Image (tube, grey):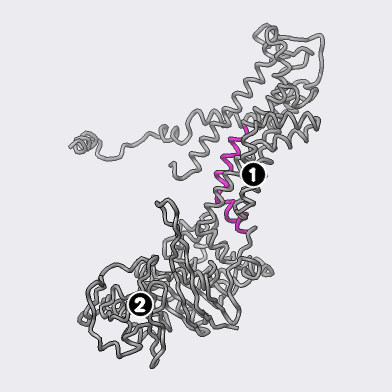
Amino acid sequence: MKGELSVKNLARHFKLRQRGTLFARTKILKAVDGLTFNVAPGEMLGIVGESGSGKSTTARLLLGHIPSTSGEVTFGGEKIGAVPNLAWRRMRRRMQMIYQDPLGALDPRITVARQIEEPLVVHFPELTPDARKARVRAVMGDVGLSFHHGERFPHELSGGQRQRVIIARALVMEPELLVCDEPVSALDVSVQAQVLNVFQDIRERNSFTGVFISHDLKVVRQIADKVAVMYLGRIVEIGRPDEVLHQPLHPYSRALVSAVPRKGRPARERIILSGDPPNPVDVPSGCPFHTRCPEVRPVCRALRPELISDAGRTVACHLINDPSFAGVPVTKGEAA
Amino acid sequence: MAIEQDGLSTSTEGSVFTEKGKLQTFLQAWPPLVILALAWLALMIFIAIFAPLLTPYDFMAVDVLARLKPPAFFGGAFNHILGTDQLGRDVLSRTLTSIRVSITVAICATMISTAIGVMLGFLAAYFRGWVDQVILTIVDAQLAMPFMIIAIAVLAFLGNSLTIFVMLLGLYGWEQVTRIARGLAISANTQGYAAAAREIGASPWRIYLRHILPNISATIVVAMTLNIPGVILLESSLSFLGIGLQPPQTSLGNMVGYGRDYIQSAPWIMLMPSAIIVITTLSVSIMGDWLRDRIDPTLK
């Protein structure tokens, strides 16, 4: 019943109109540019990356909330489109999303119990009201909400409780695919831990296929079975969390990991990236990371590295994929 | 420096907050003008419901022997407190019946126009594209043409009956509601809750009726209250022109229209309904303004 999530060459480009000139020119922003990965049934993929790297666009593409420019997403062999017709709506029964901003995703005029119940009303009209209520009560217990919270309106709950309402609404359908877009980044650390525990409890009971997006590496390490690092709409490294987050190979992953403070051990040597991430409208030629990479070689400016699997690791970097480049001296200069 | 001095002068009371009297707080929430307006509207609705029980005479009962009797205290007797008209009909009874007719027509017509407006506004917001353009063009066409002229044309062609009259007045003001509903629905659509409902798999019917409509209803209700005085005035104008409700049926405008022939000899026939039109429309407008301020959280 559970399916594999498979993504092939997924891309989403936004057209931007430049203002100010007499003739408006359109430029293309490549928010997501050629993603290919698989998530096995019951597996949880974590996606990390800095702001603007295309994480949230990826989440919405995976569920077909926005149409893709090219490429395709299939779940359990079924193609996920983005045309909101009846078939698309039926498919929502199997896949749900958890939002980053819980207050925005809740209707301010409806009590939270009725909002948790709503997916059941939509997809299982044959259930009796009592059966629905029982299921809502059960799922609210699972996420740690008391039943009396259900009679409240979203603005009467705290941030953590609202996020749990969102999680309960997604889980009440027992989805096979759950995409979480920074579900805990708006919460303070104690509530983050509670919500993550709720996630893991429910995963143990009812193993769904998941995609978990976060910019917090520690959260991802705790919850994911596989981690993808994104930079400017592309995956630069993907693999098991203990490899990607402990012995990262790609210079960008190394910089990300070195920025996480560790307790009890001497601080790692920080790799400070110079400069901001490039404007995604003008992605640099060659490797998109070469403008900030401390290990940049001449080939990086000319040739875009592909995501290549070798010896169990999957990285998009010339230095790793072809060790002969490592002998060439680092060319600093117009970088930064 | 000025701030510190201000602080010193107010600190004599021991608090930075000045305590307001209970009366002052009450008057701020319920301004006297609003209370008067609400009381008047409550009275009008009471009369509209119970008019047949309140009228001392049948509003159509003609008493030729008692024509053009002035009101009590102006030389008239107490059996006709507000006097009688040119056919000897009791002005009080006629006024009460007219209030019933006019208020009912105004409320029914406003409900029709709100329903039309919300439906078209939602259609425009849902389909966008050419449907949106067509609806907006019709709205602009309606705005460009005085409604009075359309009303006169329709009544001249179709003749007159209470049903046609209410339906016609139900076309008054729909374009305002359409614009409001369209704009609010479009902006609600970009908000998280509508997107979340869609992504749960809810049908467009469910999104628009269960989520967007309740969230924009406050503004729609205010728009409705502001439409009511317009309908009352329009009904009065059409009846005054003689193409509204036809005698022996009566309405406020109808009374004013037929009373104007006697404005010099028997002014009470038209003064009473005129005063009621003015006070009622004013009260509804005051209530609408007050409601808008109360419902809109950004104005608090």
| Residue holding disc 2 | A287
**Of the numbered discs in the image, which one, if any, rests on residue A42?**
none
Q: Does residue B212 show up magenta in the picture?
A: yes
Question: Does the rendering let one see residue A138?
Answer: no
Instruction: Give the image location of residue B229, x and y in percent.
Output: 61, 31
Instruction: Report in which chain the residue with disc 2 lies.
Output: A
Asked if residue A136 is positioned above or below residue B175 in the image, the reply reads below
Task: Name the dominant secondary structure of the magenta segment.
Answer: helix
**Of the numbered discs in the image, which one, if any, rests on residue B117?**
1
Instruction: Report in which chain the residue with disc 1 lies.
Output: B
Left or right of residue B209: residue A44:
left
**Could you tell me the amino acid type at mark 2?**
Cys
Instruction: Give the image location of residue A148, x and y in percent.
Output: 51, 62
Q: Identify the element where label 1 is drawn.
A: helix
Instruction: Give the image location of residue A24, x and y in percent.
Output: 45, 55
Instruction: Give the image location of residue B25, x and y in percent.
Output: 41, 35
**Could you tell me the amino acid type at mark 1?**
Gly
Residue B168 versus residue B99: which sits nearer the camera? B168
Question: Does the rendering let one see residue A230?
Answer: yes
Residue A286 versus residue A90: which sits nearer the camera? A286
Find the magenta span and give its range.
Answer: B206-228
Which residue is farthest front?
A23
Which residue is farthest left?
B1
Residue B279 versus residue B182: which sits nearer the camera? B182
Q: Does residue A25 show up magenta in the picture?
A: no
